[in-house]
Each structure stands twice: as C-alpha cells, then as structure tokens.
Amino acid sequence: MTAPILRVQDLAVNFTSYTGGLLRRKERVLRAVNGISFDLHASESLGIVGETGSGKSTLARAILGLIKPSRGRVMWRGEDLTLLDEEQLRQKRKEIQIVFQDPVASLDPRMTAGDIISEPLWTFYPNMASLQVEERARGIMKMVGLLPNQINRYPHQFSGGQCQRIGIARALVLNPKLVICDEPVSALDVSIQAQIINLLKDLQNKLGLALIFIAHDLSLVKHISDRILVMYMGSSMELSERDALYRRPLHPYTNALIESVPIPDPILAAQARQDSWLSGDMPSPYEPPRGCIFNPVCPYKVSRCETDVPALRRMEHGDWAACHRAEDLDLSIGPVPSREAPGTRREIN
Amino acid sequence: MSLLEVTNLQVKFNTPEGEVQAVNGLDFSVERGESLAIVGESGAGKSQAVMAIMGLLAENGSVTGKAEFKGRDLLQMSRKELNKVRGCEIAMIFQDPMTSLNPFLTIEKQMAEVITHHQGLRRDEARAQAVEMLRAVRIPAPEERAKQYPHEFSGGMRQRVMIAMGLLCEPSLLIADEPTTALDVTVQAQITQLVGELRQKSNMSLILITHDLAVVAEICDRVLVMYAGQVVETGCVVDIFYRPQHPYTQGLLASVPRMNRPVDDELHFIPGNPPNLMDLGSGCHFRERCSRVMDVCEDDPPLQVAPDGRVSRCFIAMENGEMKRAEMVASGTDAEEDSTETAE
Amino acid sequence: MNNSADIQADDLLAAAMREDDIRGRSLWVDAWHRLLKNRAAVVSGIIMATMLLLVLVGPVLSPWEGDFTDWDNTSSKPSLETGHWFGTDSVGRDILVRTLEGGRISLLVGLVATLVSLAIGVTYGAIAGYYGGFTDRIMMRMVDIVYALPFMFFVILLMVVFGRHIVLIFVAIGAVNWLDMARIVRGQTLGLKNTEFVEAARACGVDHNAIIRHHIIPNLMGVVMVYVTLTIPQVILVESFLSFLGLGVQEPMSSWGALVNDGAQDMESAPWTLIFPAAFLTVTLYCFNYIGDGMRDALDPKDRL
C-alpha cells in the first residue's frame, strides 16, 4: 500500500477563554479537538460524523492551518503543516481546499460568481492573462453544473444549491489534491442535498480527489465515504470501513446516531419507535466527565467506564473503536426492514 | 366543522424587483386532533402561508382569502383579537428558538409572563405552572433550570422550552415551523417524539412545516405537498408514502436518504432549482424539473380529487386514487411494483 | 433518469454557451433602485445638487462682489429694485452673494474634512479590527486618548500655535471626526472578519492585504457611506460653531456659520442678515440627513424577501 497523503497524528486544539473580573481572572480550557489521529490515502474519501460541539469543524480548520493546533502533527505528503510559517502554509492552500457549510454566507455578496471562482487564481497566478482566467472559471462552472453565462451574476441571484456549486467551483479551481467539505449540504433542502452529494462523488471520481466529508448525521455520508470517523466531544469514538459501520457499529454512540435517523415510512416508523434512550444533554465541554466521555448517556455503561478513559483500539477486522466493551457488545443492526416505499428508485430490468 | 379552514389564500410580496407571488390560491383544513404536515422546498410558500394566517407577514406582504379558525376569520380580526388567539389558542414554534426567547429574562419569568397575561393567575401560581410544564417536556431538574437564562440551554433544550411555552395555555392548535431542522439528529429524534406524545395526550391539532419528509412519517396524519405557492398533492400519510401520485411528491420521497437502502445505490434527486416566483407564467410550474413532462404540461394542470379526498395537481390521471398503470409503465420509473400489487 | 437529466443539462449548457452572458445585478444597483424610490431622499438630492450649482455659479453671475461695499444701501431690506435680493448687511455687502460664497466654504469644509476622516478612519479601523488582538488594543487605546482631549481646547491650541488659517479648520475637524469613523469601521470589521466568506478567502490562500481590500472594505462601504452623509452636516455644523465663536474662517472669507454669527448681532434691526444664511444652512443639514436616512434604508438588505 502506498503512503497516505494525509496523516493526522494526535491532533488537539484547545480554546482558552477567560471569565471573571480583572482581578479574579479564571482560565477555562475547552478541548475542542482532543487527540485525533487518522490516515487518508490519495483519492480516498473519509466521512467525519459528529453532532454540534463534537469538534469536527475545528478539526477541519486545524488540518487546513486556519486554526493553530495545540498539539499533534498534520503530515501532508511527508511534510508537517503545523511547523510551516504563514507564507509556506499559504502555498499549500493550492493543494488542500475547503467547501463551507453555509452556501450563501461563504460567498462575498459584493462579488460576481466569476470573481469568486477566479479569486484563488488571481492570488496564486497574478500574471495569468485575464482572458485565460475567465476561460478557466467558465470551464469550472460548467463542470459543477452551472451555466457559464451566469458568470456575471451575484450570489443573491442564485438559489442555495447553486451557491454551493459556486463554493465547490472555487475549491476546485486550483486543482487541489484534497477537498474538505464541512457539512456542505446541511443548509440545503433534502431534495437538493442529493444533487450536491452526487456532484461531489462524480468530481471525486473524475479528478481523483481525496475527500474529507463532514456531516452531522449518518444518513448521507454513507453515499460518499469509504471510511467513517465518528466524533463525540472532541474525541474519536470509532473509525471503521463504511459497510462494517452500518452493519455492526462498534461504539454505542455510533449506534445511537444510526438509530436516530428518521425513518421515512409511516408504518415502519410506528413499529420502530421505542423510547429514545439517549436522553439528556451532552455534558459541559468545560468539565468533561471522568472516564469515558460518553458514559453519562451510555446505556451499556459498566463501572469501569466511569474511571478509565478508553483508548481508540484496533479491533479484529481492522476497524477502530474507543469503547471498553467493543468486543462483547453486539450492536449489529438487524436485517433491514424489507418493505420499501414506492418512491424509492429501483433498477428496472 | 374543521378547526381551521383556509380557502383561496393568496400571499404577495412587493419587492423593488417586482411582485413575488409566494402563495397562490391555497386551500386546506385541519380537523380537531389532527396533525397536518405542509411539505415543500424552500420558496414553496409553506412558511409564508402560515405566517399570513397568523398575521405575522413582513411589512411588504399582503394577503387575501379566508382563514376560519373555530368559525372566525383570522384575516379579518383586529390586532387585539388576533393577539388573544395567538399564543393562547394557537401556539407557534420556530426553527431557531433563540430568536423567540428574550435573552435578558430567565425562562421562569418569560413563562410566568405568558400565564399571568392570558390566564390572570398569581405570580407564584404561574411559576409553579411554568415548572410543571418544563417537567412535562422532560427538562431534567426543572426547578433549577427555570431560573436560568436562554443562553444557558443547549439547542435541543431551548426548543423544549419553546414547546413548553407554546403549550402553557393549552392551545387547540400548535404550528411548528421546521422545529427540528437546526438540531442534531439525536436531539431531533427526541423532539419529534415529544411533540407526538404531547399531541396525543392533549388532543391538540398540529401543523408541521418541513422540507424533510422523513420527520413527517413519525408524527403526522395527513400531508400537504406544496410547490411554487400551490398545493400539488394532499393525502393521508400512508397514501403519500406508499402511493404518491404527483411526480414532485415522488421525487421528494425518493431523495430522502434511507438507512435501509443498499450503500452503492446512487442517491436520487430532483434536478434543477425551484422556479422564480417573480414570473411564474402559466402551465405546470414543476414541468421543467419533472421526469415525465408531456406536451400538455404547458397548460395549467387540473386539480384532480379522488373519491377518498386525495388531491393531485397533475395531468397524469388518478384512477380510484391510483395513477393509471399504463402511465407508469410507459414512464418506466418508480412505483411499478406497487401499482401492480394494487391493480391486480 | 439521472442520465437523461445529465444529457438534458448538457444540451442546456451548450445552448447557454452560445448565448450572451447574463448581466448580473449587484447589491449596489439594487440599493440604488431602492434609494430612487425614497421620495424624501430624491427630493433632498435634487435640492442639494441645485444648491451646489448655485453656490458654484451664483457668485460669478451676480453683479455684486462679496466684499463690495454698497454705501448707498447699508442695512437695506431685501428688494428687487436695489438689486440686493436678500438685502445687505451693516456695511452694505450683498447678503445673497455672501451667502453663496459662504456656502462654498461650508460645503468645502464639510466635504474635505469628511473625506479626510473617511480615508484615515476606514484604513485605521479596518486594520485594527481585522488584525485584532494586541494591534487592535494599542490602536484603539490611541483613539481613546485623542478622544479624551477636549475638542475646543485642541482647536484653540492649534489657532494659537499656527495662527488662524482655513486649512487648520480642515485639520482640526478631520482630526476629531476620523475617530468616530475608525470606531464604527472597527466594529463592523470585527463582525465581517468572522464571516464565512472571509474565512473562505483565507482558505483559498488570499493574503491579509487583499482580504482587507477586496472583502472587508467593499462590504463596509454601505455603513461608511451612510455615516459619511451624516458626517457632512455634522462637520458643517462644527465649522459654523467655530465660526460663531470667532474661531473659524477669517474676513473677508465667510461661511454660513460666520454669516449667522454676524446676522445674530443685528438680528433686531436687520433680521434678513440672519434669516437667509440660516435658512441655507438648515436646508442643507436637513437634506443630508434625509439622504443619509434613505441610504441606510436602501443599503439595509433586511427588507428583501
């Protein structure tokens, strides 16, 4: 196997805030990302899933160097990005790009689509002829499914889905090797979400991109990831091959995420509705619980979970889980209910 | 008589760019104890329709039509009468709970204010009732949490507070506008379940506005699908999910991600974007995105009503509430098996 | 079905490639259209344009010179026969010409001092806000210190050291006004730099200078322009105040403030010497305020659906 292009090792980001007055200043440390490690190979796609406050977006920004990590290394093709100075890091932006969550807010409202898409070109190739830049911008627009004759339009003249296509075009214009998608569809309508997912998938195949796809639930990552990393309160809970994760999640939290995806079927939903066992709030991130951070809400907790922090361990099949009971718990998802609503697309022979 | 009966609702907005036709002749009704889902993409006019009924339109909006709540037309009411109905007989919860809570008052104070205003209870009684309501929406340690400020609550807890506030006066109708869209999945599941339970307990009617059909399946009896300011299909929840008539409903259903679908199955989606509400023109507004568009779609499609009350705005004919089988085979897409089952 | 959609999309694309580009409609154009619908702002704009024209051309066309003394008509009432439409002052100077000439100075002070404060304030505020942290703290403390100086004391000090000169008025007013501008711009920048599109620009490798020039400043312009239209009348008023105190422009030059001061002294015997300059001053102040209000409404994107 070839060496991974991205190797994240024990990456941690702390945010320090101060409370109290001038004299009795108290320091509070928020461990937004707490020792995350993973590898990513060329043209592989990794899904990162976690809820609000799990640190997934912070992790993305730390990999890009937009936030300084407090610990750990980000090895990009053998080079540690955390050691680079600002200018060297800026040069790496050609290779690693990001697509943001809010398609409208991530576009400057006073710039045209063409300006937005060609800004990275102007930045890195200031001597490029403007005709050539425009040609490239039009080409990229076509590639992401926008009409190139809309090059002079402004973001407010596009719909949400189209704005996200502009965001993707901007990320691709420099021919990056890795694109990090930070919840690119969660602000879009369900009917538009799939358009963007399919587009990203196509582009990944066509351009041989490596992809990190961040999401807050497990329903869509399934369609775009080879492996999935599940995060909770800054730590990794599980890192598994996609199929294995959906068939038999190793961590109770992964299981909770799978079960809470709503079932789009009135009859099955009525049958499957059990008491939601994941009740209550996440503990305060400033005072994480002792032992396993998931223990206050975990239904499978044993006394050990309250004292020892489980490490992310390699399991038999090569997947990773951070749970003391990963071996003895069987969380397999039973045979999937077979009745499918007719709206589902099916191959017709 | 229905609890809420809306007829020929039209909502327009005057913008510098021109007139926006947000809702275009909407009819629907909600029975007592029933829960109705209004489903559609952003810009379908679902929120604007409800805002218009509640008298909460932006300044540049105007509304015509009728919206009779318990026999009285909400659109003709004076501001004072409407205020009495709002927040008392009809409660609303929104997508972002933070914007509807006052950040400078404790939860208890805000809730007590509602009670003293509408029911004229004493302060301490009102407080006790507020705590009771927080307990009902399963906020842990309600006595202590009631003394906290909105920013001390997480998103899911805030939405619970909003629901608790909405239910204080025991309304006969709860309108929930995308109540779970901004929440995490695990929290979303809790809130959906909570709303469903509360509704059953109190026999309250519910209007749920959402773009996500998956949420609808769990708690709604009837579904109304909107597109470009019009109803395209209505029906009971089982019919909509198992026998959708309108191609748009079928598209919406197919684009819902399903955990039980094979992994390598390509995600289905509705191509294109919602139409420009500024110049809708005539004909079927969905035709540019429709997978089975025909020549006749240039004309305005008929609103077909089946004997069981189902409605579909499409040229594809319904037969006994089912789409013609020939049509479906010819188009060679969805729902083939199902129609075979029912036709034979 | 996805395939056919793709093919259809390709056809559409090909067709669109042949067509001409669709013209964009920027937020500025939108705001302009909204402004044109605001009657008060439009009327004010027309009045101000007329005023500007009058002030520039009027004195040239008038038969009287501003410093000409008409000994036959001292303190004469406004009349068409004498040719002094607005009357004359106690030494027989034509009020109309003096009001128009004074308008030149007043408007010039308003524009120049505002532009000075605009240039310094926007740059200073944008830098402090964007870089934040230590830089911001040092820069804003300096603003606080200058702010704490009593304005009148500062002006009198300048006058004493450098003598009375019109340039000093620009300097004095500009030096104070940019502080407000810097604070406003800093506040806006603090908000803007956390927006996703600025983060996106950073992620694209755009350097700090370019971010400030291409993203921060264009997005500030709305607020800044509103503030500018509200600053111009404020500056005119400050100049009038200084002139009223006798610290402003020197004879034979004049400004509305100086004229009002003169007029106030013979208010009982010759009220027209007060009324006309005061009316010009008031109308100008009102107009700028209406234009500023109109721009604020027009640039506020909230009322779009």
Image (cartoon, coloured by chain):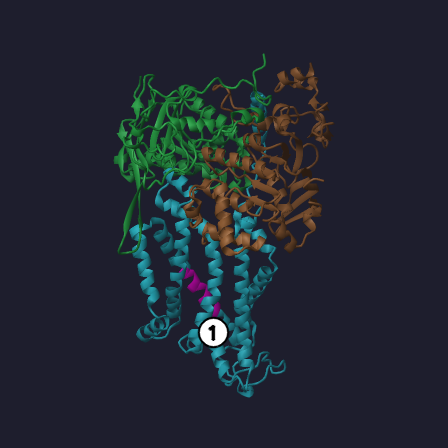
Residue at 67% x, 54% y: name it: B78
> Which chain is indicated by disc 1?
C
- Number of marks in the image? 1
Which chain does the green colour mark? A
Q: Is residue A344 left or right of residue C247?
A: right
Frontmost residue, B122 versus A129: B122
Q: Does A279 appear above or below C273?
A: above
Which quadrant holds the C terminus of chain B?
top right
Q: In the structure shown, which secondary structural element does the residue marked by tag 1 occupy?
A: loop
Q: Give the image quarter of residue A120.
A: top left
User: Does C116 appear in magenta?
Assistant: yes
Q: Is residue A110 visible?
A: no
* Crowding near the residue tagged with mark 1, few <14, some 14–19, many ≥20 C-alpha atoms within 10 Å: many
Residue B223 picture location, percent across and down: 63, 32
- The chain coloured brown is B
The residue sitting at the top extreme is: A349
Q: Colour of chain C?
A: cyan
Q: Position of residue B281 (x, y in %)?
A: 68, 37
- Residue B224 falls inside the magenta stretch: no
For the stretch drawn in magenta, the main secondary structure is helix
The residue beneath circle 1 is C255
- Along the line of sight, the residue nearer the viewer: C200 or C165: C200
Quick check: B247 left or right of A118? Answer: right
x and y percentages locating residue A225 in the rendered image? 42, 24
What range is drawn magenta here? Answer: C106-117
Of the residues shown, which amino acid type is indicated by label 1? Ser
